[in-house]
Image (tube, rainbow, N blue to C red):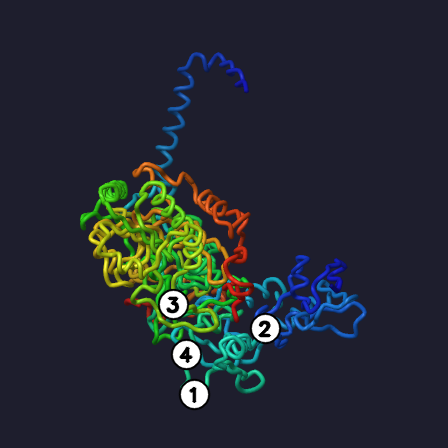
Amino acid sequence: MPKVKINDVEVEVPAGTNMIEAAAKVGVEIPHYCYHPNLSIAGNCRMCLVDIVGGRAPDIACNMQARDGLAIRTDTPAVKKMRQSVMEFLLVNHPLDCPICDQSGECRLQDYYMEHGDYDSRGIEEKVSKKKRQDIGDKIVLDAERCVECSRCVRFGDEVTGTGDLRLMNRGDHTEIGMFPGERLEHHYQGNLADICPVGALTNKDFRFQRRVWYLRETASVCGGCATGCNIQVCHQEGEVFRFLPRRNDAVNKSWMCDHGRDQVPEIAGLKRILRSRVNGAVVDVEAALIALAERLKSAKRVGVVLGSRATNEANWGLLQVVRKNLKSARVFVVGGNDPGSVEYADALLVDADKNPNSAGVALLAAYDGQVETSEALGSAMSDLDVLVVLEDDVLGRLGKSAATLVYLGAFKNKSSEHADVVIPVCHSVEMDGSYINRQGRVQRIRRAVNAAGDSLPAWLVMERLGAKLGSAPGTGMVAAAFNAMAKAVPRMAGMDFKALGEAGLLLAADPSQPEGGDARVETSV
Amino acid sequence: MSLPAARKMSSTESVYLVEVVKGLVMTMTHIVKNLFDQDRFRTVEYPDVRKTMTDRYRGAHRLLLRPDGKIKCVACMCCPTICPAKCITIIAGEDPNDPAEKFPVEFDIDMLRCIFCGFCVEACPKDAIRMDTRIYEINAYTRQAMIHNKSYMVNLMDGIKPPAEEFYRLNPDSAPAGFTPDEPSATGSP
């Protein structure tokens, strides 16, 4: 690997690494607008100009690949002057409407002006005015005046979605970003345009004017919208979630996420949440509902339990433990498919046809247990069952039938919760800790961002309390202990620790029952 | 920490009567002086007479309007951010017919919490909020009424010329840059 020097600090980086990334490794931030790690190099913003030691002229760091002996400096007076001049150049026609701009607080123009600009305005000419507030898609508002023509959005359309919808038009200081006449953004990844725009030219309609970004706190989590398990930041303030942002994980979603994932945000505090426990339609507290549930399970002869492909590993582990320790004759099922009403869209980029975030986790548990039955078996056994306990999945909606007594543990109202005799609310994925396993077999952490809505409890805790009522609890006591107990028992999770999952997650060990290369541990094609 | 020892009284002080007479002489002197020179009075006969506050006095907040009658505030959230008492609540909305795009649907200041530091006025990039009303009687019968809302603060100076504007109109040389006298006086709802 080539060794390069940044401000006299030597660092070894893989061949082909550009100098922005190499400098970041030694803690030197090189300012940039057009460079994005998951897009091609355009080199048109000129903000990352650095001096090459012994070189003829300054060059852009984003297009400078590491080679042995390369030494750059980012702290010379010349570099400082270049950055200041580029800032002045970019701001010549900027409208400076920060008070009404949604990007304020996370705007590169603001940040870099304070850090590298800080000049006195010399502008006496009138600024070039362009078209503001253009409605170019279902999710995006374009303000051409604020644009610095970095072309990130153009490259996103060309390289990631392949739609090629946004274009740079005209010349000189009349250059502006725009769409072809009569065209609108049609793809399902529009939200990313607002994320990659380093300034306020592309802003998100759903988040527009909702909250200033400096109020928001961020929690690293995983999207629960489909089996891809895109890494996200949950942006929230005082118990309210305002937006999901993609979190970079090159092995899963690079820097992107789909709009369906973002559309989950209003559902978190929406009218479809189950807030109170119900027994036979009457609102009761969770304790009473758990007692009622335990009584029904004890008195029933034939009990069926459905593991939740929308629930966390810890919840499913707890449920399996409760059943195997207390209800010897109970049958456990896994129901595939999607809830009715879920988005049917799927593509080769990120959106998976399976809308359950933890199908792989449930499959893993089923393989471990060995006696878990399929949805076909559940369909034919339904009439024999006295009580059916369902975790999150809308079994009634998916299969169209249910047992005599239905028990629903879930976050959202659906057909199953409507017809259930006992309903216990469980937390949404942004309200609890836990882990999902995505379609690659990557175990990823979700983290609690906001407090639980209503009486909701984390599902693994419901299992703990239910187990205590039935006689023997899983005995884990904490979500980390539940995960670690599962990791200890399941061979493919050997050696995993809840705290060691980290931001990027860990891959499961290869499946011994599958032939070489036959399992689903493929990298996504993003 | 020990307290200093009590001072020894002098012989006249220990008699006590002499000191009482001294005090009475002081009181009588002021009574006679005030009788003949009433301008010296420090006391104001409130509420019949009110003190005139200086131009720099930070009174109740008011919200300003643009010449076209719309509210100046664009809900940029600078004032609730800087407010050390966290007494300002703004809900932003979008106005499709206004080039300013953004406006406050609600703008509430909890005057029970406000500490009158004036940071909101300093932070405002649009000169939309000022504390130049010189109003210091901020009171109400309920806590709810102590929360000044948008229309209250817009119409606060109805029929009254805000002192600072009046002053700047008379002394345009000392007016801050960008000051334009609102003619006629800005009234009505935004």
Is residue B189 found left or right of A503 in the rendered image? left
State whether residue B147 is above or below residue A354.
above
Q: Is residue A208 above or below residue A142?
A: above
Task: State which chain disc 3 sits on.
Answer: A
Q: Are marks 1 and 3 in contact (CB under 8 Å)?
A: no
Query: In which quarter of the view is residue B164 placed?
Result: bottom left
Residue A181 is tagged as 1
Sequence-first disc among 1 and 3: 1
Crowding at mark 1 (Cα within 10 Å: few <14, some 14-19, many 20+):
few
Residue that protrudes farthest toward the right in the picture:
A54
Residue A386 visible (yes or no) = yes
Q: Nearer the viewer, residue A445 or A470?
A: A470
* x and y percentages locating residue A51 in the rendered image: 74, 69
Tag 3: Cα neighbours inside 10 Å, few (<14), some, or many (≥20)? some
- Residue B134 visible in the picture: no
Q: What residue type is disc 1 on?
A: Pro
Residue topped by disc 3? A206
Nearer to us of marks 4 and 3 is: 4
Amino acid carrying label 3: it is: Asp
Residue A186: mark in rendering: 4
- State the SS at label 1: loop
Please check whether the numbered discs 2 and 3 fall on a single chain. Answer: yes
Q: Is residue A35 above or below residue A322?
A: below
User: Earlier along the polypeptide chain: callout 4 or callout 3?
Assistant: 4
Query: Marks 4 and 2, Cα distance to the nearest angstrom?
Result: 24 Å
Left or right, residue A239 beside residue A32: left
Q: Secondary structure at mark 3?
A: loop
Q: Are marks 2 and 1 in contact (CB under 8 Å)?
A: no
Residue to which mark 2 is pinned: A34
Between A160 and A478, the residue placed more toward the observer is A478
